[in-house]
Amino acid sequence: MKSISLAAVTVGYGDGPPVLREVSMTAPPGQLTALTGPSGAGKTTALRTMAGLLRPTTGEVLMAGQSRRAAPDAGRVAFIPQGNGLATVLTVEENLLVALAAANVEPAARSAAATALDRLGLRDQRDQLLEELSGGQQQRAAVARGLVLAADVVLADEVTSELDEPNRERVLSLLRSEAERGAAVVLATHDPAASEVCDAEVRLRDGRVEQLR
Ligand SMILES: Nc1ncnc2c1ncn2[C@@H]1O[C@H](COP(=O)(O)OP(=O)(O)OP(=O)(O)O)[C@@H](O)[C@H]1O
């Protein structure tokens, strides 16, 4: 069971001003942590930094208290980006298999992919190209790709924005199951109904952080 933390992280883009200024927060394992705040507050930037896609100017990303820079293989992180980040010219199943191969989880990959697609209600779409799916189906496929990795840390960026009520509940309950198996789950969201089901809420405002509960 591994936590993910930002420790006094300052980070921005290129030569621009910092988006996050000395932000510290921890998402504990076994819990859902909501990351909230107005548009442009830096939620996506915080998730991208935790995922290792952006390098902090100062401060560190820690997994289970260990520096990610010093020990990059200490645990697996699944990042489910806003706007899904899937390859449109691959099928739904191929998108999952690519993620598994990239994470070196090839044994039993097909059955893992099938299970993840079943959990998201996408069994019948398995062999369809991603570009043939609706926005909500694509969003669910992105969640399936995040879950299939059985990662220590699951970072989900606005993953309920295009979903109808039953599917929103389904995705939130799957994220809850990820926490129950021990993952640290961080959910960036504008949706008060989604942040309410989380165990804790961290709000970003003007590049700073406030732990609300
Ligand atoms: N690739 C980029 N290059 C330069 N600036 C960026 C880039 N991505 C984001 N920013 C800037 O960083 C700031 C924070 O953006 P970020 O996407 O992290 O906010 P957010 O809280 O996730 O917003 P939203 O709720 O609208 O998704 C914004 O001022 C944005 O303009």
Image (tube, rainbow, N blue to C red):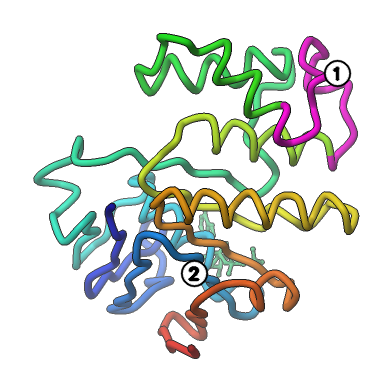
Residue at 55% across / 37% down in the picture? 147
Residue 126: in magenta span: yes
Q: CA distance from mark 2 to mark 1?
A: 32 Å
Of 140 and 6, the residue lying toward us: 140
Residue at 48% across / 55% down in the picture? 180
Marks 2 and 1 in Cβ contact (< 8 Å):
no
Of 40 and 147, the residue lying toward us: 147
The three-letter code of the residue at mark 1 reads Asp
Vertical relation: 55 (above or below) 28? above
Residue at 86% across / 18% down in the picture? 124
Residue at 19% across / 49% down in the picture? 68
Relative to 151, is 69 on the left or the right? Answer: left
According to the picture, the residue beneath numbered tag 1 turns out to be 124
What label does residue 87 carry, if any? none
Vertical relation: 148 (above or below) 6? above
Q: Which residues are magenta?
A: 118-136
Choose the circle earlier in sequence order: 2 or 1.
2
Q: Does mark 2's beta carbon lie closer than 8 Å to ligand 1?
A: no
Relative to 69, is 3 on the left or the right? Answer: right
Residue 188 sits in quarter: bottom right
**Residue 151 x %, y %:** 40, 39
According to the picture, the residue beneath numbered tag 2 turns out to be 33
Of 48 and 58, the residue lying toward us: 48
Ligand 1 positioned in quadrant: bottom right
Vertical relation: 97 (above or below) 25? above
Residue sitting farthest toward the left: 70
The crowding category of the residue bearing disc 1, from other C-alpha atoms within 10 Å (few below 14, some 14 to 19, many at least 20), is few
Residue 73: in magenta span: no
**Residue 148 x %, y %:** 53, 30
The three-letter code of the residue at mark 2 reads Thr
Kindly state the secondary structure of the residue where label 2 is placed.
strand
